Image (tube, helix red, strand yellow):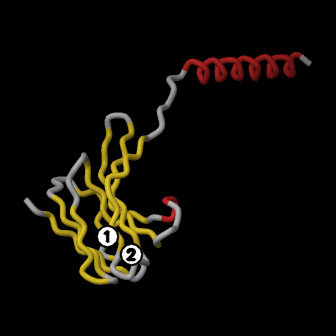
Amino acid sequence: MKLFLALLASMLAIGAISFWAWRTSPVVTPCEVIERSTSRSADGRVQADVFEQRCGDSVATHVALRPFGAPVQARGDVFIAAGSTRISLVWRDNRELVVESPARHVLVQESSWRNIGIRIRLVR
């Protein structure tokens, strides 16, 4: 019986400490997404979105593709650069997108998305 009471007291103490730590922890602020521009393919089937994602002090500029009319949750990143950087999008045809940027630090660089070819041009 003493062992049971000791274990119960330990579990209650651990629970109380965990609850206190959870209540006193700092509030996590969600990331802020700033939509900058969009560009549609010539046939209107695919949309390229340029947006910045700000999470605290961290900023990244994204280029993401999605079928036109699809929700933003359906988009897939094809280019991500650290920081806030200028992006230029040029559709060569329905199946090729050229992304131009002076980004110094590239985090993600894809060569294709579904049936769309992606060409990245880092301009200095």
Query: In the rendered image, which quarter is residue 119 located in?
Result: bottom left
Q: Which mark is residue 9?
A: none
The residue pinned by badge 2 equals 113
Q: Nearer the viewer, mark 2 or mark 1?
A: 2
Q: Nearer the viewer, residue 80 or 15?
A: 80
Which quadrant, please, contains the C terminus?
A: bottom left
Residue that appears at 34% across and 66% down: 78
Residue 30 x/y as whole percent: 48, 37
- Image coordinates of residue 80 in percent, x first then y, are 30, 57
* Amino acid type assigned to the residue bearing label 2 in the image: Trp
The residue type indicated by label 1 comes to Glu
48 left or right, relative to 29: left
Query: Contact, CB < 8 Å: mark 2 with mark 1?
Result: yes
**Dot 1 alpha-carbon crowd within 10 angstroms: few under 14, some 14 to 19, many 20 or more:** few
Dot 2 falls on a residue whose secondary structure is strand
Q: Residue visible at 33% across and 61% down?
A: 63
Q: Please, which residue is most extreme toward the left here?
A: 124
Q: Secondary structure at mark 1?
A: loop
Q: Is residue 122 left or right of residue 92?
A: left
Horizontal and vertical percent for residue 2?
87, 16
In this orientation, which residue lies closer to the viewer: 83 or 38? 38
Q: Residue at x 28, y 83 (%)?
A: 93
Viewer-side residue, 104 vs 66 = 66
**In the rendered view, would you say 22 is above or below 34?**
above
Tag 1 residue:
110
Disc 2 crowd rating (10 Å Cα; few below 14, some 14-19, many 20+) is: some
- On the rendered image, what quadrant is the N terminus found in? top right
Q: Is residue 14 left or right of residue 114?
A: right
Front-most of 92 and 63? 92
